[in-house]
Amino acid sequence: MIQRFLPTLCLALLSAPPLAAQEPRSSSKLITESEIDRARPNVANAFDVVQLLRPRWLRSRDIARLPGVRNDMAMERIHVYIDDRDMGDVEYLKSIPAEQIYTLKFVSMTEAGSRFGPTDGPGILVTLKR
């Protein structure tokens, strides 16, 4: 009986797009390349993108309302990370041209700490286009 369904299963697997080719889905914690493309020409850099599409990421009183963020993080400093390196605070986003961004992702202080080491605030992970 399994052999009867095997050709259908193989066809489904062959016709699906490769996983690497699928763009991530937007969410309250993720800004995708397609969202950034739709926001242009209103955005010049990563800071503009965040300010236009996810302004809550930049307002310290609203950070605590994001999923996975504790209330005591509301006044903490936001870090920017590129290629697993801490680039500083949100001002660094102004130096990243919008057309070079693949995704921007907000991470809690706990997530940032577990991935990058001790930190005093949440982070924004920047993934650049290759």
Image (cartoon, rainbow, N blue to C red):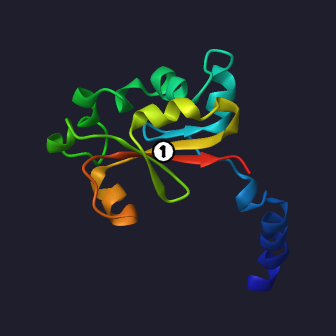
| Furthest residue toward left | 72
Q: Quadrant of residue 10?
A: bottom right
Which residue is rendered at x = 63% and y = 29% of the image?
Answer: 36
Q: Is residue 43 left or right of residue 74?
A: right
Relative to 31, 117 lies left or right = left
Query: Residue flagged by tag 1: what amino acid is it?
Result: Lys
Report the residue at 62% width, 15% height from top.
42
Provide residue 64's location: percent of width, then percent of height: 23, 37
Residue 69 found in image quarter: top left
* Residue at image point 69% right, 28% down: 37
Q: Nearer the viewer, residue 100 or 5?
A: 100
- Please name the residue that numbered disc 1 is placed on: 105
User: Does 86 sit left or right of 69 as displayed?
Assistant: right
Give the residue at x 70% y 46%: 129
Q: Quadrant of residue 78?
A: top left
In the displayed structure, would residue 65 be above or below residue 19? above
Residue 19, position in %: x, y? 71, 60
Residue nearer the viewer, 22 or 82: 82
Q: SS for tag 1?
A: strand
Q: Is residue 113 left or right of residue 74?
A: right
